[in-house]
Structure formats: structure tokens, C-alpha cells
Image (cartoon, helix red, strand yellow):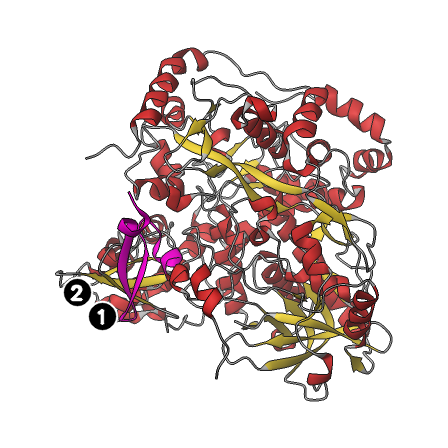
Amino acid sequence: MADAYPRSMRESIGRVEATRPERMEVEPQRLSLEERREVLDSFHPDYKEGGKRKLLVGPSRGEFVPHEMADLLEAYPLIDPDQVDLGQVDHEVDVLIIGGGGAGTVAALSAHEAGIPADRILITTKLRHGDSNSMMAQGGIQAADKEHDSPPIHYLDVLGGGHFGNDPQLVRALVNDAPEVIRWHEKLGVMYDKDTDGRMLTIHGGGTSRKRMHSAKDYTGLEIMRVVRDEALSRGIRCLEFCPTVELIRDDQGQVCGAVLWNLETEEYTVVRAKATVLATGGWGRLHIQGFPTSNHYGATADGLVLAYRAGAGLRDLDSVQYHPTGAAFPEQIVGLLITEKVRGMGAQPLNVDGALFVHPLEPRDVESGAFIRECSSPEQGGRGNGVVTPTGMVGIWLDTPMVDIIHGPGTFKRELSAIWRMYARFDIDPATDPVLTYPTLHYQNGGVVIDATGATAVPGLFAGGEVSGGIHGKNRLMGNSLLDFNVFGRRAGIAAAEWARQAKPGRPTLEHAANYAQELQGAGVDRERKAPSVLPEYRGERTLARMVDLI
Amino acid sequence: MSAEQDMIRIYIMGKAYEVPGGLTIMKAMEYAGYRLVRGVGCRGGFCGACATVFRRAGDYKLYADLACQATAEDEMYIAQIPSVPAERASWVLTELAPEDNPILALYPEVARCVACNTCTRACPQELEVMDYIQAALRGDIPQVAELSFDCVQCGLCAMRCPAEIVHYHVGQLARRIYGAYRAPEAGHLAARVQETARGDFDQELDKLEQMSKDELVELYRKRDVES
């Protein structure tokens, strides 16, 4: 069989192999807080001039967000409020959950457990039930459930990872609920990796001080998502698929009381009235901020941020974008796809073109990514110019994946990291014998809608959980805290929504907030053509787009 | 090599398009001008939304794969499966006893398996699908759970099965029974849940929540890292 790697890359692999025996003997050095700061300031894309701008209107006016996000927040409603008849109600429920990924499904189960009957709960989602970044999470979920660990130790790790910019109450909820979440999963039948006595097999993630990363091979998110979705099905909780929300509905008191959906296939709108609404629409990876490829789901277009912002909810920490250090950089077909941090957790080291280790494998993600970019950037850009160049001109860092089997025994990689193994095997690369090339990929929305510890937003009747919300992770999330986040805050939002629904008395429904927001935009001189939410990313070929006409 | 030489011809639902070589089927369809709503999801091989069938020129075989993972080839005839009609049997985990093996009662069609192995050949994850259906027939739930674990529930097995079995629902049932009832419980986890419920860490967390940033930074610097 022909070598999947071209000769120049193969030569560099020779140097990786040559340095391996020595590297395996030495414990890598961690960076000090000051050294971390230096890497971030000089090389992390968040700290680059010109990537962001101040918001002109809305509750978070004056705050910096990436241009790609600002373009959507400073945009007019997709649907003309005058075209919608809110009097024709298609669904009337107690709890409406917008988003059928991890947070939304957990919120639905939790609202149900809090006493809302299944037929009074409705999940709506843009694509299929389960379509989400939750489904794609590979490496694991954190919970301080071992004897030498504790929620307070977890707390400090979360804060340090987030550069101490997190909301303390949210972090407390995250770490304190974590063991209970894993226990709930265990009872629902999630197949966590355990030893024969039932003890959880846990390892480190970047920035953890204890080995508390629980996993289900490298399909952790898929396994959790499959189980919670199956549980929702078994309880008879409905999910309306292919119906993205295009506007929230508020009543004359300013409470959120439902949503206007739009059927992606029939192009008709649908009106849902609800006593409480949970926003669980996920993140923004598909905005391709600063032109980065992304590891995210097709639907990750930040719709929920747009809807919540127009309805009056504040946003926070959207100046910080998470780039996962190890996105695939070769072959071309899989550029941007994720190689889980678990690979580094199991011992694989990041190396430059000479096979040299240039950073500890498990720094927090933003620091690790910054170090990758420094190593790959040219000396003219202030970098070190030690990246590996691919035939299509991508530059990347080796991830020395064969170390996994050397450390843990032959067959480990294929067995415990089967998703990654399979992804490369399709291109005749065996990560158990050859390293793989990586470069940072847009991975996570660190910030989002401001919530309190119950999942409530500043807008009455509107709750949020999961990636759409902010404050939990400060300026940088650690591995394994997003699966945890959507479980903890999906659950809290579902319970709070159930409680709210029991006493809520929604008044006259209106879309006045959307009309008012449009007026504000006009006052600020925003281009009328700009509309949001974007619903789907645009990947059609340029030729098609140039010739497209709307005829029938 | 010129750009023209790089182009290949594919047939999307029977209609020919010229696209650059080396793209995944999904990206090739988008290049051709399709804005995907069905047949697209995570784009990373995890969600099973993009089940796709295709034939190659001069080859009678019908192949199956995920559009986001498989590379488009010259003269490939492509059609996506927008949705797989398959009913999940009605069952509730808490109503099952740990020793129960309800697979045959809930999915009696499993007994119709003729061991043709078509499901295994259709699986884009290259799972031993037929083997886990045979394990289900024997009532070997741990084996079904293990062999089906990497399933992305794309439904290609069910679309190809001459016995009309819905394999991925069978796998889901077995995995949940295994995870909830057959796998040993984590004792340390149950103990920690009791401690958090009792509020054992509340005082320490109160203290942390009140600390200034400087104090927290100092604590963070001094923290010991498990080796």
C-alpha cells in the first residue's frame, strides 16, 4: 500500500520516532501562570487585534464580541412580526424547550421529574433530536467522585482554567452537582468505563489537578446523548424536529411565553405558547470565527444568542473563543475534526517538525492552542517556524499517538479510542503506529447568555442551559466540563422552568420586542439586509450562489 | 496538475455534477450547490444523520457509508437516506428487572435473522452487527452491549436487512440494560453522592466562593497535581 504521508512528512516522522525513547523517560514541565499569560497574549487568536468589535445596541451594548457574532446580533428579525398571527396557536404547553441536544433533553427529563406531565413538555429542534455538539464530545466528563478528590478541588481547577473570570455560584453548582449527575447516568444505563469492581476509570484532562475524567471510550457524548434521548422517548416526551426557532414570544408584561418556529421543509411558521421556555440551542462553531475550521455540529450557528439578546437577556464572555489544540490538519478531508484531548490524557505528546516536545501536553486548552500557534507561526510573525507543512499548505503539530499503545499496551488505541482510530483508518493512517498532524480548531463558545445558578436569565420565563449560557467557564473551559455543564444546567433549567410554569400567568403575546429591536438597529444605522438567526451555515459552491435566482 | 484535471464527475440522485476530487460526499454535494437540511448533522462521523448509498461505475454492488466520512469518487452514483422509518418498541427501563432479557419480547423479529451478514457489510462503523444480533438471540446482553457500542444509529443496517430487523434499537436496549443493571456499580460514586447531599463540602465551598481573586490565585499556584 502507498504511504498515506508524503515524503517530507515521513521524514519528520522519522525524527519523531528518534526522539521518542528519550521523551518517554522525562516528565514534561508545566508552565507557570506568568508563562501561560505570555503565550496567550502573543499567540491566542482571542488576543489578536482587530478580531472583535463593540456591540452597538442591546443589553450588552459596548461589550466586545467577534465580528462574526456581532454581525448576527446586529441584525434584523428573519420573520416580519406583522406576518405572524400569534392568535393561531399550534402547540400550547407548560414547558417549551428550544434545542434537542444534551442540555435540552436533560431539561425535558428534569422538568418531567419535577412533575410536569410528558404531554405538557415540548422539545423543538432545528435538525433531528440529538443533533448537537453533545453528541460529538469524545473524551469525557469531569466529576470529583474519587476519595482523594473533592468538589472544592474541582472548583479551583475550573477557576484557574477560566482565568478566574467565572461566576463563582455557577462553578459551585457545576462541581457540587457533578457526582449526582454521573450517578443519574449510571441509573439510566450509561456505560461508563469501569474496572471489574465498578470503579470508574478516570484520567487527567488539560488543567485538572486530579484524575477525574470519566469516559465511555471516545464516544462519551454519543453514549450520554443516546441514553437521555432514549429515556425521553420512553417517557413519551415529544420533539418537533426540523423546526428552528426564529423568534421568542413575549407577553405584555415582558415575560417570555413561547416561540415562533419555522419548518425548514414546508417553510411555514408554527406558534408555540408556553408558560416557561428553556433555551438550549448550543454554540457558535459554525460561524468560523477568524476563518478557523471547526469541530462543531452543522447546526452550531449561535441562533439562541440572537433570540435571547433580542428578548432582553444579557450576554457575557463572548470575547473568548475556545480553539481546541488538536483539530485534524491532515488529510484534507478531515481538517478541523476533533482529536480528543483524551489522547494526550493517555500519554501522547505534541511535537514539532524536529520531533521535539515544546509544551506540556496538558495545559488548559487556550494555553495549549496558543503554544501550537507559536510553534507553527513563522519567525516574521514572531513565532518559531517549527510546524510541519502538508502538501496543501496547512501547518501542523504532530500528536505522537503511538505512545498510547507503548504506555498502555498493544491494542489500547484501537479499543479505547476507536472513533479516532476509525477516522484515520479510512485514509490508511494507523494512529497506533504513526503520529497524526493537528492544528487548533474552533471548538467551543466559552461565554453566552447570563444565567443564575437556577438557570434563569434576566428575562422572566426564559431559562437557559448548556453551551448557549455563559459564566460557568469564565474565559476558557476545561475538557470534560461541557458534558458536565449541559447535564448540571440542563437539569437546573428544567427544574426552574417547571417551578415557574406552575405559577406563571402569561398575558397577551406579542413580538413587540423584535420590532423595537429593529428600530434600535435602524437608529444605529445597521444595514437592513442583515438578518438573523442564520439557522444554517452556507457551504454551497460559489458558482451556484452567484447564479441563484428565486423563481417559483 | 491543473484545476480541470482535478475534477471528477458524480451523480447526485442520478444527475451529473463536476466537483473537485478529494472531497467527502457531503462537501461534494455542497460544492455542487445543495444546501443540506436532511442527510447532514455533526459532519464528524458521530451522529448518523448522513446515511448514504452509492454505486460505482461497472460494479453491481450497492455500497453504504456516511456522507461526511466517505470520499467522493469519479463516476459515483449517490443517494442519501433522509430518514429511516423504524419504530422503537415501548419499554421503560425502571420497569425491567435486572435479570430480564426482554429483547425477544420487544423485538421478536430478531428471530427472523437469516445470518446473511448484510447488516455487517452495510455498517459504516464496521461493527459486527450480525454477531450482536446473534448474541441478542442467545440472550447475551453484555455481548450485544459491547459489540454495538460504537453504533451511530444511522439505520443503514435496518434499511438493508431482509428480515426487517431494527438492529440499532436492539443495541440501544441491550446497552441500557447492561449499563444500569449488569455493570457493577461504582461504590466511590455512591459514597460521594451521599457526602454532597449531606452538605459535607458546603463550608469549604462557601469559603472558596467568598475568596478574593488574589487569594484564589495563591491557592491555585500551590495546588498539588496528581501524577
User: In terms of depth relative to the viewer, which is nearer, B67 or A380?
Assistant: A380
Circles 2, 1 touching at the beta carbon (< 8 Å): yes
Label 1: which secondary element: loop
Q: Position of residue B211 (x, y in %)?
A: 86, 32
Which quadrant does the C terminus of chain B fall into?
top right
Badge 1: few (under 14), some or many (20 or more) residues near its Cα, within 10 Å? Answer: some
Start-end of magenta stretch: B1-28
Kindly indicate the quadrant of the structure image that contains residue A244.
bottom right
Residue A320 visible from this viewpoint: yes
Kindly indicate the quadrant of the structure image that contains residue B28.
bottom left
Residue for badge 1: B163
Give the amino acid type for the residue marked by disc 1 in the picture: Ala
Give the amino acid type for the residue marked by disc 2 in the picture: Val
Q: Position of residue B53 (x, y in %)?
A: 28, 63
B8 magenta-colored: yes
**Which dot marks residue B114?**
2
Q: Position of residue A8 (x, y in %)?
A: 33, 25
In this rendering, is residue B7 above or below B29?
A: above
* B3 left or right of A301 in image: left
